[in-house]
Image: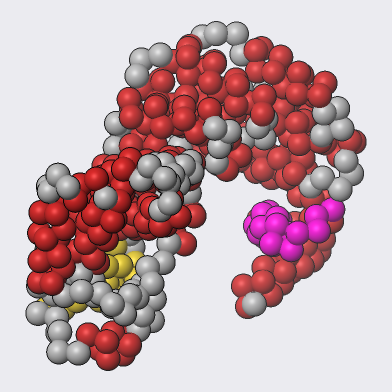
Amino acid sequence: MKRILIALAVLLAVQVADAQTKTPEAAKKAVVSAEAASQDAKKAVKVATWTKLASAYLDAYNAPIGNAWPGASKQELQLLMGSEKPVATEEVVLEGTPYLKEIYADKEFYFNAAGQLSIIKVTAPVVEDALDGALEAYKKAYEVDVKKSKEKEISTGLATIAQKYLDEGMTCYQFGDFANASINFEKAALASATEPLSKLDTVAVYNAGFTAWAVKDYERAKSLFEQCIANKYYYENGEVYAKLADVYTNLGDAKKGAEILEQGFVMFPQSQSILIGLINYYISSGDNADRLFVLIDEAKKNEPDNASLYYVEGNIYKELKQYEKAVESYYKCSEISPEYEYGYIGAGVLYYDLAIELQEKASNEYDDRKYQALIEEFEQSLKNALEPFEKAYNVSQNNELKVNIAEYLKNIYYRFSSNGPEYEEGYRKYDEVVKTRQAN
């Protein structure tokens, strides 16, 4: 299953080839020399001593990778790498995607189906924890830079380190190593926040929290998500609130989780994650579910012309199995905004889902009389879905959405195609819509 909730900014990280990358041997030697200089009392007070050490660590980090970079073709790498050849190759699958894996003495390259380098994994670093060493060296450089004359150079170095931590985090993530992905994402945020760069990378903080949550490291996840909220980073449609609430629930404080969800609901009333979380809480806890409607009514007071709030209300009624009220709320959407298709879609999906449930019940019913009654209910529910789906199709200006609606209508009309020409015509119409879209 694709893991899509990680903030996509990380996916944009690209490593640029460095024409001056040192050999592993030279890089190791430079680190030893720079470390020795940093131990000298007279040299330790000089900014250059520490910036040189930081650079040496970064060169050591880059050395195994050489001039390779994500996006490079196999032909480009063969030209740049000269006599360096893989010791083995094999085909592997990561997250459902096939790759050609090239194994070298100190690294692994993963090429996609187009022959481009997608992932670089260093297996034999020149220096362990080189990025940690570089970060500490830049911190020391800033500390001894009394005149602050090297702020720009140090900031640039810190930004480089932060980006490389992000790259490390993304590599771990792609290999399913969420625990180490979380650590690297958090290190990226810390490097970016270090003086004099002093930039809070909320995307990195969220990704650190998300991957910590994924491996059930709830205490770390709580701290990271709370940091996101404190700095007004909520991710897509308030997802941070939903995740933080789940963290509190897993830590044994479901009530606090519900409070977090309510806070998020005020800001993001259309968030399905937050809404489902609230509904689940009130149903499982036995608390009064009317609290949900108090919240939605407060939102309506602030935005009386927001049709989507009635759509949310319909979803609440649907989850509570109060179907008539759900449909009433869905149709209220069009009264407020005639061009808002989601109310009609909500009603159509409700009837369609009910029909599927009834069909399932009928398939498990052995009493013929009860079976026939369920089939009649099933067919009526399908027919009830036609009107709202038709209205949604006619109202919507979104071509992709119209195709999705057409899929429902095609299936329903096909079910009744033997009942008359109007059903046959409906089936042909929407079948053509779906086929045309698929052809494109």
Query: 348 or 229: nearer the eye?
Result: 229
Task: Note whether 358 is above or below 413 in the view shown.
Answer: above
Q: Residue at the spot x=67%, y=68% of the render?
A: 434
Q: How many marks?
A: 0
Task: Note whether 36 is above or below 325 in the view shown.
Answer: below
The part of the image, by quadrant, that contains residue 254 is: top left
Q: Residue at the spot x=77%, y=40% of the render?
A: 343
Left or right position of 103 against 13: left
Is 404 covered by the magenta stretch?
yes
Query: 212 or 20: nearer the eye?
Result: 20
Is 409 covered by the magenta stretch?
yes
* Residue 376 visible within the image: no
Placement of the C terminus among the 4 image quadrants:
bottom right
Residue at far front of view: 42
* Residue 104 visible within the image: yes
Left or right position of 418 against 206: right
Which stretch is magenta? 395-414
Q: Residue at the spot x=66%, y=29% of the render?
A: 267
Residue 148 in the image: state x and y as whole percent.
43, 46
Scheme by which the image is coloured: secondary structure
The part of the image, by quadrant, that contains residue 86 is: bottom left
Residue at far top of view: 287
Left or right position of 8 against 115: right
Query: 379 or 94: nearer the eye?
Result: 94
Residue 23 in the image: state x and y as whole percent.
16, 75
Magenta part, dominant SS: helix
Query: 372 or 395: nearer the eye?
Result: 395
Residue 383 in the image: state x and y as whole percent.
74, 45
Q: Residue at the spot x=11%, y=78% of the render?
A: 88
Residue 91 in the image: state x and y as whole percent.
21, 74
The part of the image, by quadrant, that contains residue 305 is: top right
